[in-house]
């Protein structure tokens, strides 16, 4: 199982690394620098609004479906029509409620039209996620990995053309960006269905049986409540600052969006782990198998890398923000704020990675009550700090709130998952990660001072190389383990 997991997660990471950085650095960032900052800030605020209402859109169906099919794959053909029908009902309700809420809080005109587009993006994305949850539940992780990049690959082609082709490049609007995403998600949904039809023997038919749909929604409710609370403490920051800071709100939301871009994309690695781990943990736990070795493997793969990324982001925040946004008019006047917001946000990356492992383990175990209690505490912490810090500290206040929230939740998920699943306590293992963190923190300071006369990318490369070598020294990664994975007889 260990070899199966590592081979699949490495494949998923590889295909995403080939595509998604192109999307982030050459498409999304270019759009940010091309359209007015206020327009992109409005887009990000509307995106956050749409994500908060994802509770209604998803209602936990993807997580519930993935766990159910992983434990009983033969249920897929009979369950798919009802699940798909439930999804379509929820999409309709989601779009209505989110639109009405957007109108109620003051959006008008082009902003409401943009909101409709954003809601369509989220609806189609949810449909793709539902299809992928079935593919992953069948343990077809490589196929799911390909599907995970289909939408972005299409967007790179379409948006890249619009941003490069001279007649459209200088006219590019945020509305075009939204329309392009709608088209690409729709195509990805069609491709995903055709693949699922072949490997899962499903048929495109609907079952609007009210009792059956109600049963699915009722069983998915704990998952939906969890998603709702997570969407609040993960996305409320930008919407709050955009609404309560008056005329400056849109620019602050734009700064937040620029700083959040990299950590949002870095989180794709943790999300890829969670996508594979949920059905994997679900099947292992249903068969009473020990999951502790998989948990330890995931932490050893994710946590040292997240420490490296976080410290590099903190020490080189000014250089990174300047590289990405030096052409932005707003950056030229508020560069320090960009740097601080990014540094604080990237510091929370290790917490995100821990949450992806331990919260997924609790979800696979069906410990939804515990998850929801912890998430509720996260909502209280997040909203309280946001309304306290944002009026005075603006985007920096939102970043501080995010760091405190994510760190607190990561610790809570880790403690309760270890207690409920009865994971063995290994003090030496935990101390090795703490020791690694302290060592690379000193290392970063040393590299900057010793190589201070060189270009910052040289310093960053030296720091990253030494960090990776130290991962072998601390035995988070072992040469023997790599040999076993390459050996077909390995387990």
Image: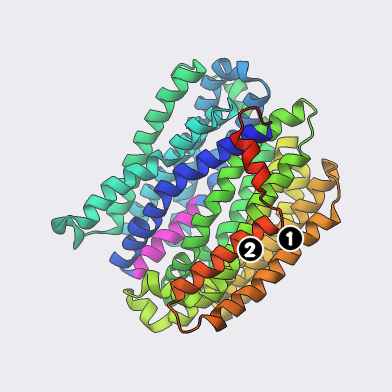
Specify how the rendered protein is coloured: rainbow
Quarter holding residue 204: top left
Quadrant (top left, top right, bottom left, bottom right) of the C terminus: top right
Residue plotted at (69% across, 70% down): 439
Quarter holding residue 42: bottom left
In this orientation, does residue 217 appear? no
The x, y position of residue 142, in whole percent, is 50, 32
Could you tell me which secondary element the residue under label 2 belongs to?
helix
Residue plotted at (61% across, 79% down): 445
Could you tell me which secondary element the residue under label 1 belongs to?
helix
Q: For mark 1, does the 10 Å Cα neighbourhood hold few (<14), some (14 to 19), or many (20 or more) residues? A: some
The x, y position of residue 266, in whole percent, is 52, 56
Task: Please give the residue where the numbered disc 1 appears in the rendered image.
Answer: 433
* Residues at circles 1 and 2 in contact by the CB criterion of under 8 Å: yes
Quarter holding residue 376: bottom right
* Residue 48 within the magenta-colored segment of the rendering: yes
The x, y position of residue 156, in whole percent, is 32, 48
The one of 214 and 288 positioned closer to us in this rendering: 288
In the rendered image of this protein, does residue 376 appear above or below residue 5?
below
Task: Please give the residue where the numbered disc 2 appears in the rendered image.
Answer: 307
Q: Earlier in the sequence, mark 1 or mark 2?
A: 2
Residue plotted at (20% across, 59% down): 169
Residue plotted at (68% across, 24% down): 71
Q: For mark 2, does the 10 Å Cα neighbourhood hold few (<14), some (14 to 19), or many (20 or more) residues? A: many
Q: What stretch is highlighted in magenta?
A: 37-50
* Horizontal relation, residue 401 to residue 342: left or right: right
Quadrant (top left, top right, bottom left, bottom right) of the N terminus: top right
The one of 284 and 307 positioned closer to us in this rendering: 307
Give the main secondary structure of the magenta stretch: helix
The x, y position of residue 316, in whole percent, is 51, 74
């Amino acid at each position: 199982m260990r070899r199966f997991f590592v081979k699949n997660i490495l494949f998923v990471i590889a295909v995403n690394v080939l595509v998604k950085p192109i999307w982030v650095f050459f498409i999304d960032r270019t759009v940010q620098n091309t359209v007015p900052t206020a327009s992109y800030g409005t887009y990000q605020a509307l995106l956050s609004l749409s994500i908060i209402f994802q509770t209604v859109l998803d209602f936990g169906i993807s997580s519930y479906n993935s766990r159910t099919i992983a434990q009983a794959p033969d249920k897929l053909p009979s369950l798919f029509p009802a699940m798909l029908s439930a999804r379509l009902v929820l999409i309709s309700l989601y779009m209505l409620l989110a639109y009405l809420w957007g109108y109620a809080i003051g959006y008008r005109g082009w902003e409401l039209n943009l909101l409709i587009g954003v809601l369509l993006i989220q609806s189609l994305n949810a449909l793709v996620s539902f299809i992928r949850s079935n593919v992953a539940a069948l343990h077809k992780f490589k196929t799911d990995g390909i599907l995970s990049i289909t939408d972005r690959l299409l967007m790179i082609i379409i948006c890249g053309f619009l941003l490069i082709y001279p007649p459209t490049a200088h006219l590019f609007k945020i509305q075009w960006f939204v329309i392009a995403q709608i088209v690409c998600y729709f195509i990805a949904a069609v491709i995903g269905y055709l693949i699922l039809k072949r490997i899962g023997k499903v048929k495109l038919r609907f079952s609007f049986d009210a009792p059956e749909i109600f049963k699915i929604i009722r069983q998915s409710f704990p998952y939906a409540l969890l998603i709702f609370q997570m969407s609040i403490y993960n996305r409320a920051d930008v919407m709050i600052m955009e609404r309560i800071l008056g005329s400056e709100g849109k620019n602050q939301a734009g700064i937040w969006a620029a700083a959040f871009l990299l950590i949002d994309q870095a989180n794709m690695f943790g999300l890829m782990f969670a996508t594979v781990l949920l059905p994997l943990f679900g099947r292992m736990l249903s068969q009473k198998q020990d999951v502790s070795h998989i948990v330890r493997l995931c932490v050893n793969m994710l946590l040292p890398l997240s420490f490296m990324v976080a410290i590099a982001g903190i020490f080189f925040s000014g250089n990174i923000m300047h590289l990405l946004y030096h052409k932005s008019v707003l950056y030229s006047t508020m560069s320090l704020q960009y740097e601080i917001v990014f540094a604080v946000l990237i510091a929370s990356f290790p917490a995100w990675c821990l949450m992806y492992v331990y919260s997924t383990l609790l979800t696979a175990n069906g410990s939804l009550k515990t998850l929801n209690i912890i998430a509720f505490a996260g909502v209280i912490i997040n909203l309280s700090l946001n309304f306290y810090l944002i009026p005075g500290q603006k985007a920096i206040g939102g970043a501080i709130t995010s760091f405190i929230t994510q760190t607190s939740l990561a610790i809570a998920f880790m403690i309760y998952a270890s207690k409920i699943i009865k994971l063995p306590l290994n003090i030496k293992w935990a101390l090795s990660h703490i020791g690694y963190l302290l060592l690379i923190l000193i290392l970063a300071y040393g590299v900057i001072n010793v190589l201070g006369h060189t270009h910052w990318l040289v310093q960053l490369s030296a720091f990253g190389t030494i960090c990776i070598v130290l991962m072998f020294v601390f035995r988070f990664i072992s040469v023997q383990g790599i040999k076993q994975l390459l050996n077909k007889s390995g387990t």
